[in-house]
C-alpha cells in the first residue's frame, strides 16, 4: 500500500525480494522483477552505490553489480513527485534515478496497487484499485 506525502510516495515494498534483474549490454536500461509481480524499469541515467549516494563514504558501483541484487529485499522504495526514484536494498545498496535528467525515465508498476512513472522532472502516480 502506498503512502502519499507532500513531495513523495512511499511505495510499500519493504521486505519484497528481487526475483530477477535484466539489463541491456550498454547498461543504460534496467528491468527488475520483484516477488509478487512488481516491475521496475529504468531507462537512462541511474546510480548504484553501496551506501547512500549523498554520503561521502558511499562507493559507486557498476551496472554489472546489479545482478548481485537478486534475492536481496527492498528496505525502502520512495518515488518523488520531482520524478526521482530511490530504492534501498537490505544489502546496503542504493539505486537512485535523478528526476530532472532528460536522459532518465523510471517506471514502477505493482499490479492491483499502483503505477508510478518519472521523467523530465515530473513523477505521476496512478492507483490501480
Image (cartoon, rainbow, N blue to C red):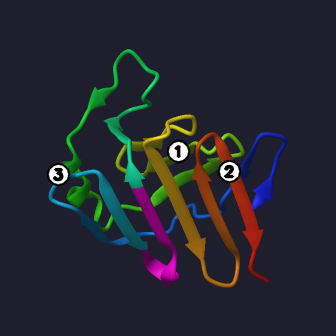
Q: Are marks 3 and 1 in contact (CB under 8 Å)?
A: no
Left or right: residue 10 versus residue 96 is right
**Alpha carbon separation for disc pair 2 and 3:** 27 Å
Is residue 82 or residue 95 the one in the foreground? Answer: 82
Q: Are marks 2 and 3 in contact (CB under 8 Å)?
A: no
**Judging from the image, what secondary structure is the residue with disc 1 in?**
strand
**In this figure, which residue is indicated by the disc labeled 3?**
64
**In this figure, which residue is indicated by the disc labeled 1?**
86
The residue at the point 46 percent across, 22 percent down is: 54
**Residue 17 picture quarter:** bottom left
What stretch of residues is rendered in magenta?
34-42
Screen quadrant of the N terminus: bottom right
**In this figure, which residue is indicated by the disc labeled 2?**
123
Q: Name the residue at the top extreme.
A: 56
Q: Estimate how packed mark 1 is, as few (under 14), some (14 to 19) or many (20 or more) residues with alpha carbons within 10 Å.
A: some
64 over 11 or under it: above or below: above
The residue at the point 29 percent across, 58 percent down is: 69
Left or right: residue 55 versus residue 25 is right
Residue 45, image x, y percentages: 38, 42
The residue at the point 84 percent across, 41 percent down is: 6
Q: Are marks 1 and 2 in contact (CB under 8 Å)?
A: no
**Alpha carbon separation for disc pair 1 and 2:** 13 Å
Q: Estimate how packed mark 3 is, as few (under 14), some (14 to 19) or many (20 or more) residues with alpha carbons within 10 Å.
A: few
Left or right: residue 95 versus residue 79 is left
**Judging from the image, what secondary structure is the residue with disc 2 in?**
strand
Amino acid at each position: 500500500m502506498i503512502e502519499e506525502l507532500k513531495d513523495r510516495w512511499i511505495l510499500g515494498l519493504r521486505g519484497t525480494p528481487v526475483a530477477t534483474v535484466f539489463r541491456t549490454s550498454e547498461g543504460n536500461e534496467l528491468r527488475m522483477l520483484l516477488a509478487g509481480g512488481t516491475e521496475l524499469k529504468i531507462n537512462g541515467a541511474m546510480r548504484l552505490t553501496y551506501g547512500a549516494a549523498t554520503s561521502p563514504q558511499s562507493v559507486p558501483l557498476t551496472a554489472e553489480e546489479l545482478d548481485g541484487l537478486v534475492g536481496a529485499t527492498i528496505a525502502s522504495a520512495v518515488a518523488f513527485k520531482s520524478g526521482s526514484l530511490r530504492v534501498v536494498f537490505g544489502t546496503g545498496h542504493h539505486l537512485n534515478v535523478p528526476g530532472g535528467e532528460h536522459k532518465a525515465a523510471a517506471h514502477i508498476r505493482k499490479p492491483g496497487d499502483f503505477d508510478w512513472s518519472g521523467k523530465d522532472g515530473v513523477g505521476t502516480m496512478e492507483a490501480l484499485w
